[in-house]
Image (cartoon, helix red, strand yellow):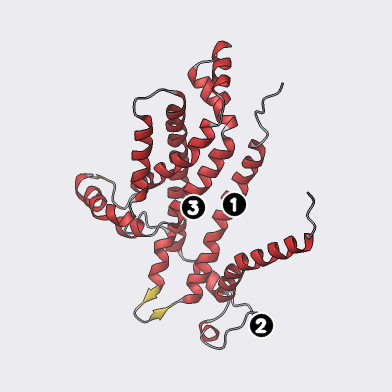
Amino acid sequence: MPNERPWLTVLLWVVLSIATLFPIYWLFVISVKPAVELFSTPSLFLDTIYWKNYVKVIGDDTLRRYMMNSIIISSGNAVLVTVLAFMACYALSRYDLAGKENIFFWTITNRMAPAAVFLLPFFLLFTQVFAIGDWKLYDTRIGMILLYCTFNLPFAIWTLRPTIDGIPKELDEAATVDGATTWQVITEVIFPLARPGLAVTLILTWVFAWNEFLLAATLTSFNARTITTGLSEYVTTTGTEWGTMASISIITLIPALIIFSVVQRHIVAGLTFGAVKE
């Protein structure tokens, strides 16, 4: 049935777009105003643009290091979690494992608990148990990548499993009859058809790792400190540097937009790739 009120749909999308984009616009307005104007009468419009906040952020070597740490940790964790979740979902979907539903439920329970519950055990593990000589996990990128697997892997398995279950097992059997090995079935049959689900899993996992604050603030000091925890350095006893924090927040949106734009293309391509033809 055709839409009898297209203008209502357009109006709804306009309202939703404004509600979504306005906080970002307001963040940008704060980032290009000097401190004096921020505490004066608020204005939605820009009379002049004050770029010194961005110059200060871009020229700060420490902030650039924090940004690189966030990119490496988030990307490394997203790739590792997506690969592990893909293999785990394939095993849960294709093999008759004893108590596999219980295994799946137990995996999800690890995601149900808040991160604060694991804070003290992980702190002791990172600073005492896994701190032998020069080898340690505290304040390291590899330590944070492995740490985030604890929370992101259960979510990734829960997100990806319906995609794997939706792929007919007859395709596996047909490929096996044609002489394909198990690894060839996974990489040449299952993987292409699961690309939309893999892309969504990758995006969500990357965002969760990118935005995480509590664990990163506790288990990093300087070498692996992320940009989200670096923002807290601008909240001091003498005041809060709102303009600098806003400019950092705007800059941190750029990697997220790049990741999303790249993976979104694979989502659209994966919707038709590998379709079964009569």
Name the residue located 55 percent from the left edge and 70 percent from the top edge: 54
Residue 238 position, x and y percent, is 36, 82
* Outermost front residue: 1
First in sequence: mark 2 vs mark 3: 2
In this view, the residue in front, 254 or 62, is 254
53 to 277, vertically: above or below: below
Q: Quadrant of residue 163?
A: top right
Name the residue located 63 percent from the left edge and 36 percent from the top edge: 270
Kind of residue indicated by mark 3: Val
Residue 62 position, x and y percent, is 42, 62
Q: Which mark is residue 258?
A: 1
Kind of residue indicated by mark 1: Ile
Q: Quadrant of the C terminus?
A: top right
In this view, the residue in front, 97 or 218, is 97
Q: Which residue is mark 2?
A: 47
Q: Which residue is mark 3?
A: 207
Q: Is residue 107 visible?
A: yes
Name the residue located 50 percent from the left edge and 48 percent from the top edge: 204
